[in-house]
Image (cartoon, helix red, strand yellow):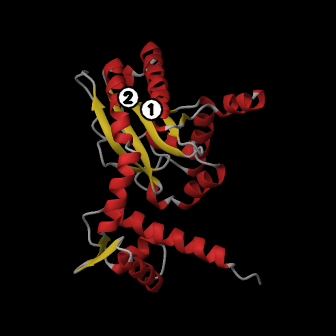
Amino acid sequence: MHSSSPADTSLRSIARATAILRTLASDPQADWRLSALADAVGLNERSTRRIAQALCAEGLVQVTPLGYSLGVQAWLMGEAATERHSLTTHGRDCLLRIAEVTGDVSILSVPFGRTARVVGREEGDHPILPMNLKVKVTRPLGCGAHSMALLAAMPDAAVERVIEEDEAARQSFPSFTKDRLRSLTATTRANGFAESAGDIVAGMSALAVAILDQSGRPIAALSCLAISERLTGKRREAALCSLVEQGDALATRIGGRRFAPIKAAKAASRNQ
């Protein structure tokens, strides 16, 4: 039998601590009981308590009369990260431009654990606008164009983990089966953008592009949502052009790049 090296053990501890912090951040106003927190991160209560106590000692987590919540140090780190990586600030102009060009809804989403979280929304002047995606709404990765754009930009192994392990999280979205998610991922990668048409709300469609950081990890998605009849033909092309244009603009501002079609990216790499 092979024993784990100290490095492997340390990496597992960091991953578990991160999972606890991410879970607490998913509902920052809640007080998480130990049993609920352990279930959410997939650990036993003894391990969860031990890690949570270590995080408490660093000020990242605090004990409340009803359980655990994020600590002051976590808030300070969040404030510091916001100053440097304010996607909502950088992305707002892009959202406004998309909404202006299309007359429909534009949203900015970011990966949040194994979900996509809406952090920005702007509305155009069309009288009928989708209302199902608002700021702070989360969706399992792969469910909806904005969420699929993020999933498809992830490495193969990460995509497979999401597809295989997050089936329970997708129970409210039964049309997104494992096989369909794999098919949508392949299509999104080939096209360089994600698209949905009535998959979650009948009569509503969406287009989305992903933004990558300097290391190639997806950190955001820009999307356009509209009633389905408005995302066809020339209107669809105009919306997609606006998404690509604003995706490039946002990527430039944060020092990243827009997710490109896999075939095109490989060809560009060979030509360099």
How many circles with numbers are drawn on the protein?
A: 2
Q: In the shown orientation, is residue 77 left or right of residue 167?
A: left
Q: In the shown orientation, is residue 74 left or right of residue 155?
A: left
Q: Position of residue 129 (x, y in %)?
A: 27, 29
Residue at x 53%, y 42% (from the top left corner): 213
Query: Alpha-carbon neighbours of circle 2 within 10 Å: few (<14), some, or many (≥20)?
Result: many
Q: Is residue 107 visible?
A: no
Who is closer to the viewer here, 248 or 103?
A: 248
- Which residue position holds label 1? 250
SS for callout 2: helix
Q: Is residue 139 visible?
A: yes
Dot placed on the residue nearer the N-terminal end, 2 or 1: 2
Q: Position of residue 42 (x, y in %)?
A: 48, 73
Q: Position of residue 107 (x, y in %)?
A: 36, 36
Q: In the shown orientation, is residue 156 left or right of residue 119?
A: right
Q: Are marks 2 and 1 in contact (CB under 8 Å)?
A: yes
Residue 75: quarter of image: bottom left
- Which residue position holds label 2? 94
In the rendered image of this protein, does residue 68 appear above or below residue 86?
A: below
Residue at x 60%, y 54% (from the top left corner): 158
In the rendered image of this protein, does residue 87 appear above or below residue 129?
A: below
Residue at x 48%, y 17% (from the top left corner): 237
SS for callout 1: helix
In the rendered image of this protein, does residue 175 appear above or below residue 102?
A: below
Mark 1: which amino acid? Leu
Who is closer to the viewer here, 57 or 229?
A: 57
Mark 2: which amino acid? Cys
Residue at x 59%, y 58% (from the top left corner): 161
Which quadrant: the N terminus?
A: bottom right
